[in-house]
Amino acid sequence: LALNKLGVISKWFDVRAGEKDIEEYANNSNCRYIIVFDMLLPKIQKVLDYTRVEKVLIIYPTDMLSALMQTVYSLKAKRLPKDARYMRFKEFVKAGETYSNISCVAFDKERPSIMIQSSGTTGKPTVVGYTKNDLDMWTECVSRIACMGGASEKDVAQICFGYGMFTGALGLHYGLENIGATIIPSSTGNSEKQIMYMKDFETSLLVATPSYALRLAEVA
């Protein structure tokens, strides 16, 4: 469903299908990529040469684990076939981390809506290109979460997340603005000034990390 949302034409095949059936599915659909769990690799390897498939993206169960658990199970992990056509699915996803490769996920660099990246705490930040539709969905989701938490159009919302390339503040800003709340885009740091904003604008809703909210309480 996520691939379809990106505009990719996808087809499913039964995991119980035999090699001939998989070969037929791939050729009849002009399939270029196959995404499979590692347990299906033996079947795929037998028929790959008879198809027009360019890449086999393999999902390993250990890829779903935390970094620590992946290390624990790395000795038991199956080896990636020595063939350029085979690729770990998580590595394929990482290929979209740089701006130059964003087009691989159907992002039109000629008409970008916004560029966002992760904090980079664990290494090089992950860059993501957001389309207009992405922003609309993001706004809607945050609006729903905010309303479930008790926010309304009567609130004065002070957002103490960073405004910049990081994904934090903008989502909250769009979502709260969407429900009609008044926004104070105070961003991070300068706690004394944050307290001043709260008093001057009569902030009724604070958006911050728990630790920074406690810090503001100490300063106040």
Image (cartoon, rainbow, N blue to C red):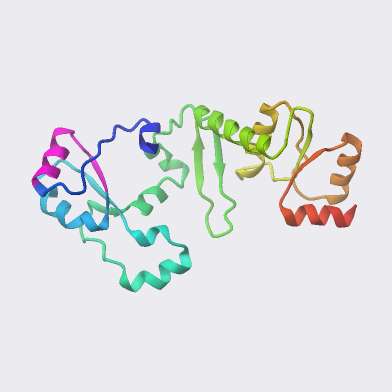
Q: Quadrant of residue 12?
A: top left
Question: Is residue 205 shown in magenta?
Answer: no
Q: Quadrant of residue 144?
A: top right
Q: Position of residue 15 (x, y in %)?
A: 21, 48
Residue at the image point whose x is 56% and y is 41% from the top: 116
Q: Position of residue 127 (x, y in %)?
A: 51, 45
Stretch in magenta: 20-35
Q: Is 200 situated left or right of 178 in this image?
A: right
Along the line of sight, which residue is nearer the eye, 191 or 149? Answer: 149
Quadrant placement of the N terminus: top left
Q: Is 112 situated left or right of 213 in this image?
A: left
Along the line of sight, which residue is nearer the eye, 105 or 158? Answer: 158
Residue at the image point whose x is 17% and y is 51% from the top: 44
Along the line of sight, which residue is nearer the eye, 62 or 100? Answer: 62
Residue at the image point whose x is 50% and y is 41% from the top: 128
Residue at the image point whose x is 36% and y is 70% from the top: 74
Q: Position of residue 124 (x, y in %)?
A: 52, 55
